[in-house]
Image: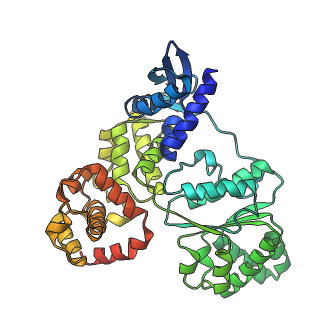
Amino acid sequence: MDQSIWKKVKEELKIDLSNGVFKVYIDSTTLISLENNFALIGCNFPNIAQVNQQKYYSNFKTALDRHTQNNNSLKFEVSSLIQTPTKSIDSTPLFSFQKTNSPSISALKSGLHPKYTFDQLVVGNSNNFAYAAAQGIVKNPGLSYNPFFIWGGVGVGKTHLMQAIGHEMLKNNPDLKLKYFPAETFGNDLIAALKSKNMTQFKDKYRQLDCILVDDIQFIAGKDFTQEEFFHTFNTLHMAGKQVILTSDRKPGDINGLEDRLVSRFMGGLTVDIQSPDFEMRCAIIQDLATKKGSLIDQDAVIFLAEKINTNTRELEGKVGQIAISAQSKNSPTITLEMVEQSFNGESLNNNSRLTSEKITPRHLISVCARHFNIKTGDLVGTSRKKELVLARHITAYLLLTQALLPLEEVGHLLGDRDHTSIMHARDKINTSPQLKPLINQIISSL
């Protein structure tokens, strides 16, 4: 009975909280006991228990009270039921999630990476629509969304989502003829087939599949014969009801050198974009990455990392991996804020933050933004909520964070003593508005 109640509690929390928060902090919890209106809730790591106790206590309590019709008290603690101790090479005790199932033979033959599954995917505001569409494809391949075109910047998870669909389709049907390949591979195979005069074998290789997952399709742009062959391959598969999934760094209509007939075909299904993860999702990703590396991570360290690296998950993965190795070499089971801060000493943060505070002052940046929007500096940093001022203020906040590399609190102080959550909201709103990128680049060029 208790576990049935707990299942309902988690289902309710899944609706109330973001997918990223749910996946990292809520989904792994278990109800150890519920007696005399006291619930003991198990978590897989101490910091997760701490965050749930301090931040999500009221969410858990409200849901549990509703389903038990009682006024309950809750306590979160680390539970051995969901925690699996392992040993590192030097016998230092670490902790990790229980191992997931090994990839199937069919998945490996199809070119899919073992870690790019739905189980390993953190879902949040930046990718939840694409994720929902992916679930529809898995249920009805070739029917729901075909082709499925995913676009977005570097390291936002396009390949992961695409391959996760492939893993799930093979799990449902191991005999499915599915192939993942970069668009460049298609072009190289075509050239090899032309040299060996074996075009029939080339066509059979790609046109007799049940599903193709093509990465970075923009690389066939400007290559006439490659586009010709891909057009016929696409048509053959699509007409037969086979699933086609494509990724690109931009939407079809923005790929220079891509033939109109291919643009038309690619946009004939569902086109979705994946944005850079917002702050909350970055926190969830960092927590998830640290866990997979066998390390605990302090909440302050999570927040620091999420604020410092705001571009893509690939940078986050590299940085968390680096810090985790450093922590383990020091026999420390926990990644602390001090360790994270030390890892950034002397480093440039990301490609979008090459201008350092030594080259640009906050006041100069604010002045440039005010001039660009033809408004007074006093109005830009004032309290007015006029629409034209709000947009200018959001962009200014974003640039102060990414170009002047100021902390959230200082940006809030400069822009009218606003709190850090308002600045986070401004930054994430700009991050998820690709149509503003040309405008932002124009302002950056004038700094």
- Which residue shows up at 42% across the image and 67% down it? 433
Q: Which colour scheme is used?
A: rainbow
Query: x, y percentage for residue 26?
Result: 51, 35
**From what the image shows, is residue 360 above or below residue 34?**
below
- Which residue shows up at 37% across the image and 31% down it? 54
Give the image quarter of residue 32.
Answer: top right
Query: x, y percentage for residue 123?
Result: 54, 50
Q: Is residue 406 left or right of residue 133?
A: left
- Which residue shows up at 63% across the image and 80% down it? 263
Foreground residue among 24 and 183: 24
Foreground residue among 359 and 327: 359
Give the image quarter of residue 258.
Answer: bottom right
Query: x, y percentage for residue 266?
Result: 66, 75
**From what the image shows, is residue 368 above or below residue 349?**
below
| Residue 56 visible in the snapshot | yes
Query: x, y percentage for residue 116?
Result: 62, 52
Q: Is residue 169 left or right of residue 399?
A: right
